[in-house]
Image: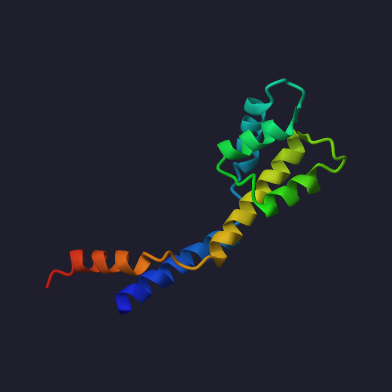
Amino acid sequence: SEFQQLCQQLEQAAVARAASAPPPADMSAKAKRVFEAHDANLTGKLSGRELREALDSMKLDSTSPDAMALLRRFDADGSGTLSLSEFQQLCQQLEQAAVARAASAPPPADMSAKAKRVFEAHDAN
């Protein structure tokens, strides 16, 4: 129906806007707080395990092939650790990658069913 198509178009427009938005201004500050909370041994570096835990706590994917490629890219010396500035840059890249994936994903399969339920609930006549 037209209403279902409208809902899908609105969803796609919202995702497209999110994809073109710059990373949140507070990402760097959030990354710093998370970094400090997960640098368990206070070395000023995150080990591989600390890094995965930190990214997971920020709801950033630390297991996808894209994330692994970014980890290798930011760990230039291959030490398996990242400094705070490297971690902040990595978080911004992962956030941007997540937004880009969301923008290219098809609308949820249940969008039409949701749209129909909303329409029927609000169709007064």
Is residue 29 among what the camera can see? no
Number of residue marks: 0
Instruction: Tell which residue pokes out farthest to the bottom in this image.
Output: 2
**Is residue 32 found left or right of 81 in the rendered image?**
left
39 to 5, vertically: above or below: above
Percent of width and height locating residue 43: 77, 23
In percent of the image, x 30 and y 74: which residue is there? 3
Instruction: Tell which residue pokes out farthest to the left in this image.
Output: 125
**Is residue 119 found left or right of 12 in the rendered image?**
left
**Is residue 73 found left or right of 49 in the rendered image?**
right
In percent of the image, x 79 and y 46: which residue is there? 72
**Is residue 60 found left or right of 11 in the rendered image?**
right
Q: Quadrant of residue 57?
A: top right
Q: Quadrant of residue 118?
A: bottom left
Percent of width and height locating residue 22: 62, 55
Instruction: Tell which residue pokes out farthest to the top in this image.
Output: 41
Is residue 46 among what the camera can see? yes
In percent of the image, x 80 and y 48: which residue is there? 73
In what quadrant of the picture does the N terminus appear? bottom left
In what quadrant of the picture does the C terminus appear? bottom left
Percent of width and height locating residue 34: 62, 32
Q: Quadrant of residue 74?
A: top right
